Image (tube, helix red, strand yellow):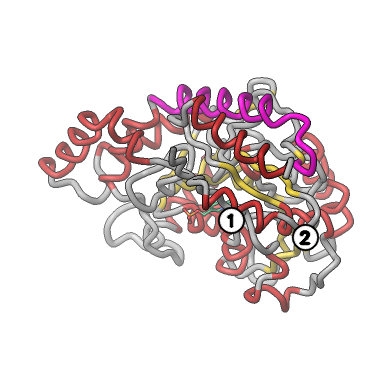
Amino acid sequence: MKVPFVDLGLQRASIAADLDDAVRGVMESGAFIGGPDVAAFEREFAGWVGVEHAVGVANGTDALEVALRAMGVQAGDEVIVPAATFIATAEAVVAAGGVPVFVDVQPGTFTMDPHAAEAAITERTTAVVPVHLYGRLADMDALGALAAQRGLAVVEDASQAHGAARSGTRAGAFGTAATFSFYPSKNLGAAGDAGAVVTRDVDVADAARRLANHGGTQKDEHVTWGRNSRLDTIQAAILRVKLSHIDDWNAQRRTNAAIYSKLLAGLEGIALPTPAGEDHVWHVYNVLIANGRRDEVREFLGAAGISTGVHYPLPVHLTPAFTSSGAPEGSCPVAESLSSRALSLPMFPELTEQQVAFVADALGSLVTT
Ligand SMILES: *Cc1c(COP(=O)(O)O)cnc(C)c1O
């Protein structure tokens, strides 16, 4: 048996006719930039998240930059980001002219530690970017309260958490603004690069729309500085098809995660993800391998036909790109230890119970040898 890390082909096969119709519709319409599919996807996605506005952009990294700028982040502003995230979270702060300030994550959830965030605030701090890492919601109650009390903007990086929800509020609907990536392997993925900014605030939505379209909302209008980061129309048409399946796909991910957690329970040297209900959509099913054996375990699984991932081999503050950021080794111990122990097991909606069992058996045989 072979178990891929992700299999996008199975997803396509299940909805191929609808995807092909969507692409053909755009080709025949000749409306390749903007057009009805972009507007419709923005409306439908905002409604699904539970906010008033969505602005489609070119990718999730741009979505962060555009959202930060639209929320008023300016050159030299300090923006608090977690050390455990994909590098884009910090890159976007730099692209917006800001300075990323790395803080540690909480053990157990691996999302931004509200106490660490509070301790990092200076008079130059203007925003905080919680990341819903692996698909699990950050502690938005504590972080939202902190931001409100200290007058900071909150931009949720929801790129891994489409549909994660707490008490009926979905990722992207906790603060004023949030961002999504629709990179193909994300829970909601396009057939290429795509992203969105979502917000409850019409002024933030208008600002984001101008920033992503040369500073205006129509041709030859340039009321502010802007750039080109528009959502591609073919991607919007594809995303509209997939949006109608995302709740089912997330439910299947939750089922697969529950089977993993049941079959792997009690294995020595492997720490399982903290139990989660609706607040996790399992973009990644991440276990921790103790005793410096992560890479050995990974190799063993690879030889058995099981593909795995590491999210991420280095915490962002220790990547070469950000070593001058002022956060030395040892400053974010939870994120640092996560990088050396994290192992992401195969996870996608179409994964079968037999495949999950095969992975669990392989891990079990290794741990007991
Ligand atoms: C994927 C991702 C992004 C960036 O998205 P792109 O569409 O690849 O630019 C940003 N933040 C997080 C946490 C991500 O996982």
Which residue, given by chain and number where applicable, does mark 1 sit on?
299
Report x, y in % for residue 291: 80, 54
Q: Nearer the viewer, residue 189 or 118?
A: 189
Question: Left or right: where does residue 29 sit relative to residue 277?
Answer: left
Q: Quadrant of the N terminus?
A: top left
Question: Left or right: where does residue 236 sit relative to residue 259?
Answer: left
- For label 1, the SS is helix
Which label belongs to residue 336? 2
User: Which quadrant of the figure has residue 141?
Assistant: top right
Instruction: Say few, some or many: other residues with alpha carbon within 10 Å of mark 1 (under 14 / 14 to 19 / 20 or more).
Output: some
Q: What predominant SS class does the magenta segment belong to?
A: helix
Question: Left or right: where does residue 352 sit relative to residue 333?
Answer: left
User: Which quadrant of the figure has residue 230?
Assistant: bottom left
Q: Nearer the viewer, residue 330 or 9?
A: 9
Report x, y in % for residue 289: 73, 48
Does the stretch in magenta take in 42? no
Q: Which residues are magenta?
A: 245-270
Does the stretch in magenta take in 253? yes
Report x, y in % for residue 300: 59, 52
Q: Amino acid at mark 2?
A: Glu
Q: Residue 23, relative to residue 225: is it above or below? A: above
Mark pair 1, 2: CA separation:
21 Å
User: Which quadrant of the figure has residue 215?
Assistant: bottom left
